[in-house]
């Protein structure tokens, strides 16, 4: 629809205008201009030091996501397929999910010290719970008529899980993975902001300490773009699954 | 009855909850003749679906036996029985064609045979133009055709249908009823149809079993004597009114009893 | 009250976990420098509360959090209601709303510190920023889910616009609004306490950060326990309210 595209462009333009006005109002010491930010962002992308930080964050994020997905889906499936286990675990999982994970940071730091493992663990504890919860609910919410159909078609339990339950639950599992990946990135970054080891998060802290405002803005913009890209990618995957599912 | 297809003897079903027992069904006796079209009607909650589950082998009776082709059911669905459910059971992630082929694929048959049988079933149920569509793009009636085709393609001797047209509007129901009759004549299967619609039971069936309020037992078996070549236009036959009248007079009393109202004159 | 098997097993699992943790700590399998036994955490918290030393910090955090929560809820609801009433404006915003929690909003912290300085304003703004979109999204969801037939009934009963909103649509959207409140609370708490960790100037977060840096595990774990208890109580109460509303509405 043309009008939707147009409206989105209008919104983007309005956003840039407000940004520029803010810059003019409070000065470059507080808010960098859009132009300065974009220039600095481009410069960063060519700076090898930036890429060292980016690889540190990206690597930890990737590993944490993988562990979170495998662990979360596995846990969710186990709890979803066995009704009793799922009933016992449901409130426990939801309570643990609602605990702000930041309360666990000092504990994790005590265990792992300021290391890569700490960063990855932060990411994992953020992502594994929504993925497990979504997966468990996805399996439990499979329409009862599907199970009865599998019985009527005389499928073995293994065939029932792999050919009926898994495809039926997949769209919702993908939603959980999308949420899980997003909060895993959040956890990884918070780890860097808090523990200030290496990575983009710590680069942000450095920029804050040295008051290089344009660096703060440029790094934030790049992070924003990265997160949006990942989210769009997973969303595309999710839509592809839903079309077939 | 000589050589019945299915025999039900003394079947009851009692559901045990934490601190209560619900006597849902029976005791029931029934003989189903090979190739007959048998409908079950009854008030809400009388145990019609429970009966179907037991006939299919999806549930075990608390007492009594069900014998299919001379062999007693042992708590799992035997080969040769097909079931169509009330809810939409199409697999949303497969196309119409793949849905219909699903059961055959799980049986591990040859691709050529699968294609032949699925193509035939899809065409037979009028689904050919939609073969590559996904269920989400279909109407309720079409989705039920897919479920029927998926069951048909396995060539069952007995077809059990649990209020398959319950979610459809009246006119679609009547057309689907005609489809069911065509299917019945073409395959020669024994059909058991659970329905709450009296006119549907009366126009489609050779015999109709009328169940009482819970615990459901057969209080009447009505024989229609309709010709095999029939369709929904049988409603204009002189005997149609008396058949539905006979069903409703008894069913009305049972329904009122079921909702606890005082019996009327 | 009927005691279910599931409830019993769950209690055993949770109690067992605590007992196991206590044993692992007491028998030295878990190093004292890493974690103190749960019973000592409770004792430490009790001491801190009794001495009143941490009261100013606790008050600081609670006030910050409440302010952020109220901001999130009020602003979130108003923005949500406004967007719902203006579909033309809503459409371009919608993808941004769904993508919001994909972006680590924490990256704006340095910007907030630059703008507001190292004080409670930055914390409150962060908390509110974190929580507000959950409220907007759920307000939209709740108002969307008001069945058209309910609106038609309001018209038939000849209700004015304000009456329609307050007497019919708001109650109809209530289950989702409460979900939004629950999420706004959770996110606001995270935003504020994480900020207090990083800034370490005042608040419960600061006490935890100091405890960590000074190797004062008793303080650190005592304050962590306090945070945990506060969060679980509030979240538990809101969850109960949410569940009851969803049940009354037949799980819409």
Image: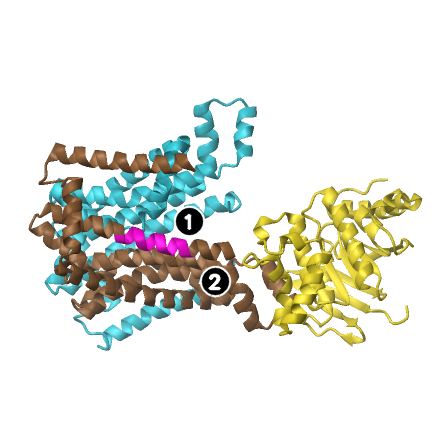
Chain colours: A brown, B yellow, C cyan
Image position of B90 (left or right of C73): right
Q: Toward which corner of the image does residue B221 lie, by quadrant?
A: bottom right
In the displayed image of the protein, which residue is found farthest to the left?
A210
Q: Which type of secondary structure does the marked residue at label 2 adopt? A: helix
Q: Nearer the viewer, residue A77 or A230?
A: A230
Image position of C198 (left or right of C16): left
Name which residue lies at 32% across and 37% down. A9
Q: Percent x, y for residue A125?
A: 30, 63
Residue C240: give its label.
1
- In the picture of the structure, the residue carrying the numbered disc 2 is A87
Q: Percent x, y for residue C240?
A: 42, 49
Image position of B186 (left or right of A204): right
Q: Is residue A67 visible?
A: yes
Name which residue lies at 22% across and 69% down. A117
The range drawn in magenta is A226-237
Q: Toward which corner of the image does residue C115 lie, by quadrant?
A: top left
Q: Which type of secondary structure does the marked residue at label 1 adopt? A: helix
Mark-to-mark CA distance, 2 and 1: 17 Å
Front label number (2 vs 1): 2
């Amino acid at each position: 629809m043309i009008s939707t595209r147009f409206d989105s462009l209008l919104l983007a333009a309005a956003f840039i205008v407000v940004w520029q006005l803010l810059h003019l109002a409070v000065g470059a010491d507080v808010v960098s201009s859009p132009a300065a930010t974009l220039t600095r962002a481009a410069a960063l992308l060519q700076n090898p030091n930036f890429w060292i930080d980016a690889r540190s964050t990206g690597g930890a994020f990737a590993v944490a996501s993988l562990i979170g997905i495998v662990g979360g889906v596995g846990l969710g499936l186990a709890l979803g397929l066995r009704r009793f286990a799922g009933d016992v675990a449901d409130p426990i999982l939801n309570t643990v999910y609602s605990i702000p994970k930041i309360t666990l940071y000092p504990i994790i730091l005590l265990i792992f010290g300021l290391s890569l493992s700490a960063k990855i663990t932060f990411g994992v504890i953020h992502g594994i719970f929504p993925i497990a919860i979504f997966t468990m609910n996805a399996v439990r919410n499979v329409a009862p008529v599907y199970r009865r159909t599998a019985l009527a078609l005389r499928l073995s339990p293994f065939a029932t899980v792999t050919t009926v339950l898994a495809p039926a639950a997949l769209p919702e599992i993908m939603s959980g993975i999308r949420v899980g990946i997003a909060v895993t990135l959040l956890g990884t970054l918070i780890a860097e902001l808090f523990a200030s080891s290496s990575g983009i998060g710590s680069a942000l802290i450095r920029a804050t300490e040295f008051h290089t405002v344009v660096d703060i803005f440029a790094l934030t913009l790049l992070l924003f773009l990265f997160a949006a890209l990942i989210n769009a990618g997973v969303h595309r995957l999710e839509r592809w699954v839903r079309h077939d599912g | 009855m000589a050589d019945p297809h299915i025999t039900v003897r003394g079947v009851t079903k009692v559901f045990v909850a934490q601190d209560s027992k619900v006597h849902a069904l029976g005791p029931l006796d029934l003989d189903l003749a090979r190739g007959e079209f048998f409908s079950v009607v009854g008030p809400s909650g009388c145990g019609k679906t429970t009966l179907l589950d037991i006939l299919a082998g999806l549930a075990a009776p608390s007492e009594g036996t069900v014998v299919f082709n001379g062999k007693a059911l042992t708590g799992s669905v035997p080969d040769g029985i097909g079931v169509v459910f009330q809810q939409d059971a199409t697999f949303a992630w497969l196309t119409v064609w793949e849905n219909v082929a699903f059961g055959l694929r799980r049986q591990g048959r040859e691709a050529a045979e699968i294609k032949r049988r699925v193509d035939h079933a899809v065409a037979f149920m009028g689904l050919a133009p939609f073969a590559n569509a996904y269920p989400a793009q279909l109407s309720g009636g079409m989705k039920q055709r897919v479920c029927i085709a998926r069951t048909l393609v396995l060539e069952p001797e007995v077809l059990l249908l649990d209020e398959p047209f319950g979610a459809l509007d009246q006119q679609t129901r009547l057309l689907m009823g005609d489809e069911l009759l065509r299917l019945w004549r073409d395959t020669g299967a024994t059909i058991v149809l659970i329905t709450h619609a009296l006119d549907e039971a009366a126009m489609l069936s050779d015999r109709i079993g009328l169940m009482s309020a819970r615990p459901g037992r057969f209080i009447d078996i009505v024989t229609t004597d309709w010709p095999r070549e029939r369709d929904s236009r049988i409603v204009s036959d002189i005997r149609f009114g008396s058949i539905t009248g006979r069903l409703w007079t008894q069913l009305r009393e049972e329904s009122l009893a079921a909702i606890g109202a005082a019996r009327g004159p | 009250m009927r005691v279910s098997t599931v409830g019993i097993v769950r209690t055993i699992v949770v109690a067992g976990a605590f007992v196991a943790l206590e044993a692992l700590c007491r028998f030295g399998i878990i190093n004292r420098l890493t974690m103190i036994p749960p019973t000592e955490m409770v004792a430490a918290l009790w001491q801190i509360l009794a001495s009143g030393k941490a009261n100013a910090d606790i008050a600081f955090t609670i006030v910050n959090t409440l302010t952020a929560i109220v901001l999130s809820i009020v602003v979130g609801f108003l923005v949500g209601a406004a967007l719902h009433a203006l579909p033309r404006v809503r459409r371009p915003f919608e993808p941004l709303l769904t993508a919001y929690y994909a972006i680590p909003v924490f990256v704006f912290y340095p910007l907030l510190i630059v703008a507001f300085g190292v004080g409670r304003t930055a914390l409150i703004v962060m908390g509110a920023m974190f929580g507000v979109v959950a409220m907007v999204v759920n307000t939209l969801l709740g108002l969307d889910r008001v069945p058209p037939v309910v609106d038609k009934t309001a018209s038939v009963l000849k209700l004015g616009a304000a009456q329609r909103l307050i007497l019919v649509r708001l109650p109809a959207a209530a289950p989702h609004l409460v979900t939004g409140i629950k999420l706004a609370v959770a996110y606001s708490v995270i935003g504020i306490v994480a900020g207090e960790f990083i800034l370490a100037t005042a608040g419960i977060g600061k006490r935890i950060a100091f405890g960590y840096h000074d190797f004062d595990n008793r303080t650190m774990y005592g304050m962590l326990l306090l945070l945990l208890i506060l969060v679980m109580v509030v979240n538990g109460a809101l969850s109960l309210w949410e569940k009851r509303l969803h049940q009354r509405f037949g799980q819409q």
